[in-house]
Amino acid sequence: MIEIPKKEPLNIVPFIDIMLVLLAMVLSISTFIAKGEIKINLPASQTSEQVSPDSNPRMVQVDGKGVIYWDGKEVDLQQLEEAVKNIPREESVVLRIDKESRFEHFITVIDLFKKHQHENFRIATEHKKP
């Protein structure tokens, strides 16, 4: 008579352990990524337009405290002026200015761009539903 070997059940405990370790790694890494983002509360506008995802424009950001960022790095007005001076006029720039920021900060940034005849900029806003 032929003896049929018994089938051992699949042990999935090691697989679950590996998945839990990977989940813990992803969650810890994702919190580091979120901390690097500059928090800007944009004003709302009914006529706002979506920036095309294929374009990668330069970005000037001003947070609620008036801190200025150029392409994600904190700069002062002199550094921003130097950066604006050195970019081509046809290159697009997006201005993201916090709605809690003083209007003076907005005017200062706009004046700086106009001083160097760089008028290829867009002002970012949140889309407000009518």
Image (spheres, rainbow, N blue to C red):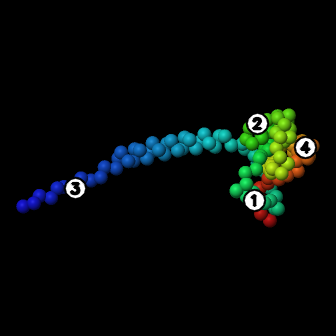
Badge 2, how many Cα within 10 Å: few under 14, some, many 20+? some
Answer with mark 1 or mark 2, whichever residue precedes in sequence. Answer: 1
Circle 1 sits in a helix, a strand or a loop, which is it? loop
Badge 4, how many Cα within 10 Å: few under 14, some, many 20+? few
Mark 4 or 2: in front is: 4
Mark 4 residue type: His
Q: CA distance from mark 3 to mark 1?
A: 59 Å
Circle 4 sits in a helix, a strand or a loop, which is it? loop
- The residue under label 2 is 74
- x, y percent for residue 45: 82, 58
Mark 2 residue type: Glu
Q: CA distance from mark 3 to mark 4?
A: 78 Å
Mark 3 residue type: Lys
- The residue under label 3 is 7
The correct choice, above or below, for 4 with respect to 112 in the image is below
- x, y percent for residue 8: 24, 53
Extreme residue in the bottom direction: 130
Relative to the observer, which residue lies in front, 78 or 4? 78
- The residue under label 4 is 116
The quadrant of the rendering that contains the N terminus is: bottom left
Q: CA distance from mark 1 to mark 4?
A: 26 Å
Answer with mark 3 or mark 4, whichever residue precedes in sequence. Answer: 3
The correct choice, above or below, for 128 with respect to 57 in the image is below
Relative to the observer, which residue lies in front, 91 or 27? 91
Residue 50, numbered label: 1
